[in-house]
Image: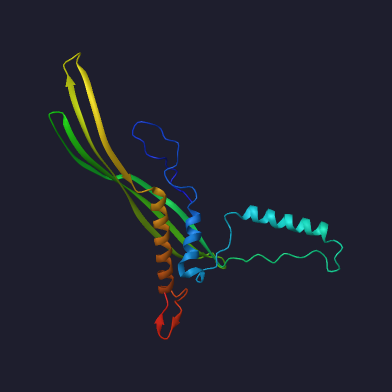
Amino acid sequence: MDKTGQRKPGDNIANLSSAVTQGSEVWVIKALQDVGNSKWFEVVERVGMDNLIKERQLIRNTREIYEKDREAGPTALKPMIFAGLLLEGGVVGYDSNTAVGGIGGRYLGVGAQTEYRIDTVTVVMRLVSVNTGKVLMSIATEKSIASYRSGADVFKFLDLGTKLVETEAGFSVNEPVNYAVRAAIEQGIIELVYEGVDKGLWKFKTTKGKENK
């Protein structure tokens, strides 16, 4: 989740939009399922726990009404799977304008320029044992977001009524913040897997003496 509380940076306006995504947990779930082709981690739902419990209660109530005449009673729901490990954390930092720069020139009212800026997203995750409450490991990853703008313009004064004519052309490229958050989370999951091996929490399955990663 977003723990920065920051808003999108704006030069001359107050921006009420959040700087980073408010749904980063979906990338954590996807990363855990993708690593090891869904065979290394069994992910259970906790973000939408309230909706899950309400739906299960609805099923129970419906079965009690329409299956009350069954000799064995209403069909019972299968028990929910409990988690042995919890993955906590969030986006803890969004630093804008960590590096800025550019180059430009103008001659006789004709000019061109290129500007760039770099922002940084920081993600921290920790793995917690449900049995003991012990923090087994903590991982921090960073991803830089590069943006640049290139433009050309022409300024010319016309002596007829002293009017200013201005034309401008250019383009800008931004690496989306959401992509940066996703990349930092995925890298964090990879680091978590390898650190877990180093700490002896799990190990890679080996086949004929070779690691199957």
> x, y (%) of residue 17?
45, 39
Task: Give the image quarter of residue 138.
Answer: bottom left
Is residue 135 shown to the viewer in this render?
no
- In what quadrant of the picture does the C terminus appear? bottom left
In percent of width and height, residue 193 lies at 43, 69
- The answer to whether residue 52 of the structure is visible from this angle is yes
Position of residue 125 relative to residue 120, above or below, is below
In the image shown, does 8 or 4 lie closer to the viewer? 8
Pick the residue in front: 8 or 196: 8
Query: Is residue 203 shown left or right of residue 148?
Result: right
Q: Position of residue 79 (x, y in %)?
A: 68, 66
Query: What residue is drawn where x is 21% and y is 42%?
Result: 102
Q: Residue at x 61, y 66 (%)?
A: 82
Q: Residue furthest toward the top? A: 161
x%, y% of residue 176?
38, 48
Q: Is residue 53 left or right of residue 22?
A: right
Which residue appears farthest toward the bottom when viewing the image?
208
Q: Nearer the viewer, residue 63 or 16?
A: 63
Q: Residue at x 82, y 58 (%)?
A: 66
Q: Quadrant of residue 114?
A: top left
Of residues 65 and 6, the one drawn nearer to the viewer in this rendering: 65
